[in-house]
Amino acid sequence: MEKIKIGNKRLKIKVCADSLSQAIGLMFSRQKNILFKFDKEDLHSIHMLFVFYPLDIVWINKNKVVDVKKAYPFISYLIPKTKAKYVLETSLNSGIKIGDKFSWK
C-alpha cells in the first residue's frame, strides 16, 4: 500500500499502473482507495461493471483534482470533463473536490 494526500485527507491506496490491473480495478473487490496511474494525461474513462458499492471517482492531473463524479453499481461508463493522469476510486461522499491539491509520497 502507498499513501497519497488530497486536500486535507491522507489515504492508503493500491496503485494500478498496468493495463490488466486497470481493466480489473475494483471488480469483485471490497477494497477501496485504488489509484490508476496512466502514462499521460487524457480523458480516462471508468466503468462500474461488477463493482457492487457506490464510489467517488476523482480525476487528478499532476498536482490537483480536476473532476469528481459519483459512481453507482453497474453504471457502465464515466468520462471526465478534463484530461487527467491519475484516477482515484474511493468511498462515496469522500469530500474530495475539484481544485484540491494532490501529492504522492
Image: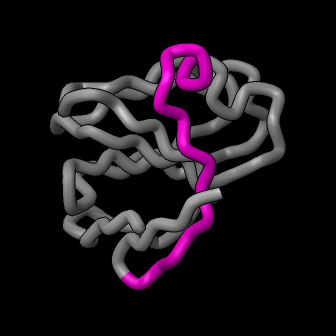
- Near-viewer residue (97 or 21): 21
x 27%, y 58%: residue: 65
Residue 70 appears anywhere in the view: no
- Near-viewer residue (67 or 75): 67
Report how many numbered discs are placed on residues in the image.
Answer: 0
Q: Residue furthest front?
A: 105
Residue 13 image position (x, y, % from top left): 60, 56
Placement of the C terminus among the 4 image quadrants: bottom left
Residue 85 image position (x, y, % from top left): 26, 39
| Range of residues picked out in magenta | 8-23
Residue 83 appears anywhere in the view: yes
x 35%, y 77%: residue: 7
x 42%, y 72%: residue: 5
Residue 17 image position (x, y, % from top left): 47, 31
* 74 relative to 34 in the view: left or right: right
Q: Is residue 93 above or below residue 28?
A: below
Placement of the N terminus among the 4 image quadrants: bottom right
Q: Is residue 22 above or below residue 34?
A: above
* 71 relative to 28 in the view: left or right: left
